Every structure is written in C-alpha cells, then in structure tokens.
Amino acid sequence: MSATLFGSLRRADQRRWAEAYLLGLLVTQGKKSVRRMADTVSASPTAAQSMRQFICISPWDWGPVMRELTRWAEGHGPATAWTIGRAVLPKRGDRSVGVHRYFDPFSGRTLNCQLGLGAFTCIGGIPVPVDWRLHLPTQWTEDPRQRRSVRIPDTVHYRPLWMQALELVDTLAAHDDVTPAPVVADLSDSPDAGLFLRALGRRGYEFAIAVPPALQVRLAVERPPGSTEFATARSLLSSCGTPDDVRVTRADGRRERIRVQSALVTPPGSGTTRLPERPHRLFTELLPDNRTGPLWMTNLTARPLADVASLTELRAATEASVATMARDFGLLDFEGRSLPGWYHHMALVSAAHAYRQLTPPPEIQHRRIYHSPRQSRTAARAPRQRSGASAP
C-alpha cells in the first residue's frame, strides 16, 4: 500500500518517513504522539525529529496521496455512496491553524477546536476517508499575520461549510477512474442547506441530504400560476397521509422494519430558473412515542424508499468511522500548528484507517526500522535539520 500511496513523493527519504509515520499510526498503542511513534518504529535517536520535520516542514503535496488512496480504496469494490463527515478536534490555546469557538450540535457544547470536513467513499458499507478540508473562519483568512504564522497559501480563502462540502464532492467526481456515487451528508443544522441541494442538483449528483426542519418546501402538485404555498419541511410532513412500512439495513448491518413518512416536494429555490422543476422526496422515520427522526431530502425518487432510507444509515457509519480514527489512529494527536502539517497528518491518518478497515489484520506487519551502531552514533551527532527529514 505505501509504495502506491507515496509514489508521488519525490525523495526516497520522504517515502521512507511516510511509511514510518503510517506504521507508527497502525501499531503504536495509546496516544499517537510523534515521540511515541518514533520509539515504536525506529531505533534511531533522531527519528522523532525527522518524523516531525516530515509532517510539519517538508514541502510535499498531499493531494496526489489522497487521490491514490481513493483509487486504492475503490479497488476493493465499488462505492455505494460518498458521505461527508465532520471531525471536531478540541485544542488548547489559539495558535493552531483554524482554531475557533464552535458550537457542536451533536454534543450540545461550544468548544475551542479545529473543524474538519471529510469525504468518505463507502466500500461495502465501510466509510473510508479519502479527502479533507479544514474550516478556516475569517479571523484566519483575513489576517495577514495569522496566515503567515501557519503558512496558509495565497490560494486558500474563507469558504462556508456547505461550499467546502461541495468542493469535496467535486474533487471526488473529478477522478478519472472513479464512478460517481450518491452523496450522503447531514446539513440539518445549516441555514445554507438549500444552497447545497441546488448546487448538487445543478451538477447532476444524486443525493440524500439531512435538512433543517425549518427548510421551506412545497408539495409537488399542480397549482395556479404565481402560487407558492410554501411550508416548513417539518409541518409539511406532519400533515401528510399514511406512512409506509419499509425494511432498511442499519449501519451495523441489522435488517429492521420501520415506518417512514414521505412526500414529493419541489426543492427550495425552484422556480428561480427556466429549468423544469424536478420533484424531490422529503422523508423521515417515525420513531416510538410520536417522535420523528432527521428529515431527509433526496432526488433518488425512482429508487425504492427502503433503498434510500438504508442509504441514509451511512451517516451513522461515517460518524462511527470518525470516532474510530480519533480513538485508534491519532486523529486528535497532531502536534503542529501549520496548515500543510494538518493536511499531511490527516492524509496519513486516513491511510492508516483505510488500511485497517480494508486489509485483513494478518497482513499488517510490525517491524522496527533498525540502524547499525555507526549510523545511530552519526545521527546522534548530526546537527538539527531545517527541512525535509532524511532517513537515518
């Protein structure tokens, strides 16, 4: 795997330290600090310094690595969906790139953190991370001093979350040898969900998107010219007729029969162009005690409702993958502050998670990178390097 992923790295020492960092993420127990990983995979006294320089300073492009990771993952089977997941990375202080105060709707707390958006390709129901965007609030993009301090390139500017999610989808779709898959994302807390839906539709993507209950929609029925009859998504569904009984596949593989309320609607923004209005399906699961689940909007109206409802279960599977990356693969353990360093770390964490998810455990080999006594003594006397790490 490492030879495939890191073939774009120009120098042999970069490829060696990429493999060492990847191995460290896979086999180091507990916190994946650079020091702990270096002690696990190398006997050199300067291994930690070299690994840190490789991630934080060495000027290698992570884009080709993520493209190769996408090809490698989809070589294990066709993607059933592309999902967008969020990674909330708590931080102390305010010097790490992108750190800001963010209200996390899932925990109900306001956190000092970095916020990453990840694109996942789902192989056999397993979400595999293949690309990332770090959300940069305007206090980072509009302050020249801040930009210089964390090496934000001139080409990077502020983008709202929905636009960054769209960039992730466009990047996946641009791969020559990747077949487009339905997009699954949760924008139930975003006032810009309608913008995301329209952008996906204009590009011809299939999708199932969780939308806010207050999203304005209307039934897809004949109406007099100039009539609007808009209502909130929640109130419109509550006024619909008899629900459907469908059999869905849960994120853990269980088959379960549920009740689903749905309606054909015209999406937000319809009527603003001369293009014909294509009906979308708005639906939600009816839970016990008269409660309802998230509201979903999809343009997959020709598919059975059971298939589309099963597709939305991949949201929970993606959240579980992010949690696994945080617990087992060092997602939260990046020690640097720069933007390139963050993307380097996320590329290697994604590769480690993908390898463990798609490769049988017996194929993971734990080997230390040993060196001769002469090499170790020479490395110990070597002056501190300023750029791309070279393997001892």
Image: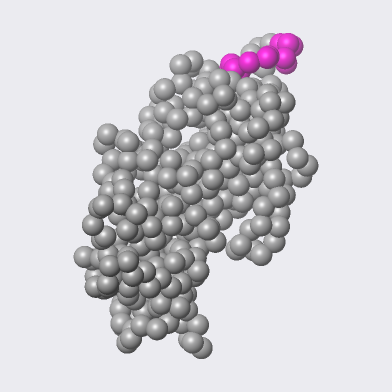
**Does the magenta stretch mainly form a helix, a strand or a loop?**
loop
Residue 199 versus residue 42: which sits nearer the camera? 199
Left or right position of 160 against 149: left
What x and y, as percent, mark residue 141? Answer: 63, 33
Residue 14: x, y in percent? 52, 21
Q: Measured along the vertical axis of the image, is residue 66 above or below residue 236?
A: above
Compared to residue 258, the image places residue 295 above or below, namely above
Q: In the figure, residue 34 lies in which quadrant?
A: top right
In the image, is residue 382 part of the stretch drawn in magenta?
yes
Split into 4 quadrants, where in the image is the C terminus?
top right
Q: Nearer the viewer, residue 268 or 16?
A: 268
Segment tinted magenta in the rendering: 380-392
Q: Does residue 364 belong to the magenta stretch?
A: no
Q: Residue 242 lies in what quarter of the image?
A: bottom left
Residue visible at 53% across and 58% down in the picture: 190
- Residue 311 seen in render: no
Please name whichever residue, 133 or 367, is drawn nearer the observer in this view of the structure: 133
Q: In the picture shown, does residue 275 fall above or below 34?
A: below
Q: Residue drawn 55% across and 20% down?
A: 59
Residue 365 horizontal side relative to residue 360, left or right: right
Determine the residue positioned at 42% across, 45% down: 166
Residue 321 % position (x, y): 50, 54
Residue lying farthest right? 93
- Locate the N terminus and report the quarter of the image it occupies: top left
Q: How many marks?
A: 0
**Could you tell me which residue is drawn at 30 percent across and 78 percent down?**
246
Whether residue 15 appears in this view of the structure is yes
Residue 179 x/y as whole percent: 26, 44
Residue 48 vertical position relative to residue 290 in the rendered view, above or below: above
